[in-house]
Image (cartoon, rainbow, N blue to C red):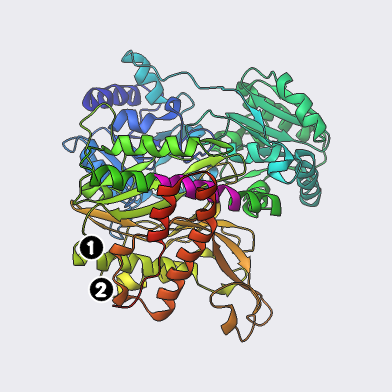
Amino acid sequence: MSLQRLAALRALMSSQPAALSAYIVPTADAHNSEYISPADARREWLSGFTGSAGTAVVTTAHALVWTDGRYYTQFEKEADLTIWTLMKQSLPDTPSIEKWLSTNLLAGAVVGVDPKTMTREEWTPLQSALTKAKMQLIAVDSNLVDLARVQLNDPPPERPHNEIIHLPSQYTGKTAGQKISELREKMSLKKAAALVITALDEIAYTLNLRGSDIAYNPVFFSYLLITPTAVQLFWHSGDVTALADSLLEEGVTLEGKPYGEIVPALREFAKKLSESGDGEHSIWLSGEASEAIHRAAAGDGDLKKPLNLISEVSPVALAKLIKNEVELEGFRQCHIRDGIAVVRFFRWLHAQLDAGHQVTEIQAADKLLDFRKEEKDFMGPSFETIPGAGENGAVIHYSPKRDGTQRDIRRDDMFLLDSGGQYKDGTTDITRTRHMGEPEQLQKDNFTRVLKGQIGVGSALFPKGVKGNVLDSFARKALWDVGLDYAHGTGHGVGHFLNVHEGPAGVSWRPYPHDPGLRAGQILSNEPGYYKVGEYGIRHEDLVETIAVTKDTKHPRAGDLLGDYEGRGVLGFNTITLVPHQKTCVNEGLLTDFELKYLNDYHERVFKTLGPILIERGLQEDHDWLEKECSPILRS
């Protein structure tokens, strides 16, 4: 099918008013969402590659996909390699998309892309590179992959518009009215006549609303336009009657508009702003908003002189990055409940395999979901569970197929389980790797090296305001010391009952372009790993809360402080994930005394927190298993 689909796309490329030499298909929707709905899964439909990140480039002779190290193995399994070429973008020798196009197309070539699927920040450097190579980048407003799907009688599914729920301030800690008032203050300082919010999680956060239009992400397809006097939500048909009363109680009068009217509404607003003759006020939007939204907001094509825009990091992204005390306490509490579910699951899994029962990866994921469903305020998984047994654990974003051959989890397997939950009071994301029987020595050594990296990050102290990428090497040192590494970042931000991957901060070997610097109140993941392709994978993932540290703070390194970085302030992490690591996979000889104490103290905290809850709920077998798993590791 991939060849047929490519042929249909190439025919459409050649039939454009200016024939296209190349067409770019990002993994993107009109809101720059990391995870997308089936309605926007164009690159997946075209290439067969189902990973959540990657950009396809199709020319008359080539079909290529750029993706990162999380997906190399997956791409090679899923795509037709006689047709598609993998471009390993994590490798330094791999040319960027603009470099490849500039090198492989002839001068005068026209490159097309749907401007709704590319941000202004992506569009501008690509356009500059192609212009320099005497090529042209043009906006193709009708998505050619969607047209190809219609031609092949396989049209894209309808865009969802599911029910929206109100999340009250007992969970959010701040009303929508307070949030909008703060945004309007920032707008006044910027002399912005309007703020356009296009990222779905930012809209949900601002209005204290949640949806389910994208699997695992509690968001809804919409745009939000805030002016000094109005709040307009462009959603579905525009009927917001069911939401109006809740928002009015939070101090917001909400006006509804149809989702599809955002572009004409912005064009009309730009026209009125231009006609007012003010000249001082602009429209403010994120640089990560689409090129299509930027053009509409500027009145491009409508005005003789398009408006100047304030295009920079979104003020909402910066606001929701720092959690308030209600949100932080919610995170702590939901991780206790989530820890109960994960502990019960692992006890159950070991018991099943020890008894000789068959358990597939999908059955394991389903059983974990059953345990989570028993916990208060659970709303669903925060992403598709990754239950990688044996060699599947080396596929970093592995996903077993329900309609295919299901792999059993065997007693000689390393089993990597990456999963998470959405709760009304927070979001969880945890990875634990356990051997189902007796690990080999090299597996124990590598397990321990990854654990040393996680402890290195989890126990680090650092100046307030440093960017997350400076912490990345702490996680890799024990692996680097023996020539090993992993091809993904070490940490990402996490939303509050929102997207499990939240910018603009993170911990990675690559700097996050809009990272404002670490501050107290952030929630990040801490997840180093190691993957031996074809054999097994190891990843340890906790969520951590960024905290201010003084000599009196409960932190393993607080007592050693001699200063506060010349007044900048000291930050550290508090781990909020509460699930033990498998002691039989730990080579204590590789741990320093500090690391061994850190691990034993963590296990003691896990047991003291979860143990009484298990007893209270009558879960004696789970309690006893946890007590054994959390007993101290002693030097042999």
Q: CA distance from mark 1 to mark 2?
A: 14 Å
Q: Is residue 447 above or below residue 260?
A: below
User: Is 338 a magenta residue?
Assistant: yes
Q: Answer with the quarter of the image where residue 546 lies.
A: bottom right
Q: Is residue 625 left or right of residue 11?
A: right
Q: Is residue 560 above or below residue 125?
A: below
Position in image of residue 375 (x %, y %): 53, 39
Residue of label 1: 443
Residue 514 appears in the figure: no
Q: Nearer the viewer, residue 435 or 96?
A: 435
Q: Could you tell me which secondary element the residue under label 2 belongs to? A: loop
Check disc 1 and give the amino acid type.
Gln
Q: Is residue 165 above or below residue 192?
A: above
Position in image of residue 180 (x %, y %): 77, 41
Residue of label 2: 482
- Name the residue rendered at 39%, 19% in the picture: 147
SS majority, magenta: helix
Crowding around mark 1 (Cα neighbors within 10 Å: few <14, some 14 to 19, many 20+) is many
Q: How many marks?
A: 2
Mark 1 / mark 2, whichever is N-terminal: 1
- Name the residue rendered at 64%, 59% in the picture: 521
Q: Which residues are magenta?
A: 332-344
Numbered label attached to residue 136: none
